[in-house]
Amino acid sequence: MLTLDLNRPVGSTFPVGWTTVTIDNAVEGEYNGTRYIDLFFKDQPETLKCRVWSAVNAKTSEEFAIANLFHHAWAGITVDEATNTATIDDNVRHLIDRVINVLFYLNDDGFTDAVGRVAPVVSQHFTEADVSKLKSSTERYHAGRNKTSTGLNGTADTVTETADVPF
């Protein structure tokens, strides 16, 4: 026999919009030769994750997307004050227990998803103006993307991908 709680709210109770989260787990993977990191959050179900794909600047050949993740989480960073440079140990273990801002949205299928870019929280490393600017940048990135999706019948919709994300 099954029991149904009639007091439970109908629909998704996942967050939508900017949410400050603590990283509970980070898992590194690769798809078709491109690195990604999946982020999972405290007090959120494991089905709600943020996948950050590696992206390389075409002019400088420098990776920036995963580097920004570590920078915005202020994770694995060592600053050399003498040379005014920083190095990043990009082992995912450094991301655990870091606090960041993530933009959650409802995808085309009505499920909560996360934009693959994050923003920092106000701290000694980031001012309120910095955080606001990075949030706006993430919102523009998200608004400018045409997302891939699969229709309810299991067939892929026609898509034009405009972002530097390897799908």
Image: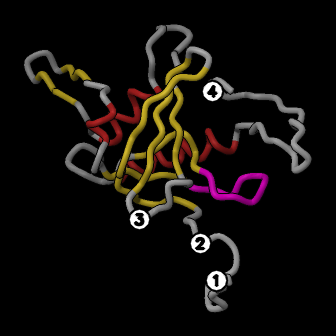
Residue type highlighted by circle 3: Asp
Q: Earlier in the sequence, mark 3 or mark 2?
A: 2
> Identity of the amino acid at label 4?
Val
Amino acid bearing label 2: Thr
Q: Which residue is mark 3?
A: 43
Determine whether the residue tagged by mark 3 lies in a helix, strand or loop.
loop
**3D distance between C-alphas at marks 4 and 1:** 35 Å
Residue with the most extreme bottom position: 7
The residue nearer to you, when weighing 153 against 80, is 153
Real-space CA distance between mark 3 and mark 2, rounded to the nearest whole angstrom? 12 Å
Q: Which quarter of the rendering shows the C terminus?
A: top right
Badge 3 vs badge 4, beta-carbon distance below 8 Å: no
Q: Is residue 4 above or below residue 117?
A: below
Q: Which residue is mark 1?
A: 9
Circles 3 and 2, Cβ within 8 Å, touching? The answer is no
Compared to 30, does 50 lie above or below? below
Mark 2 and mark 1 residues within 8 Å of each other at the beta carbon = yes
Q: CA distance from mark 1 to mark 3?
A: 18 Å
For the point 40% across and 59% down, the residue is: 20
Q: CA distance from mark 2 to mark 1?
A: 8 Å
- Disc 2 marks which residue? 13
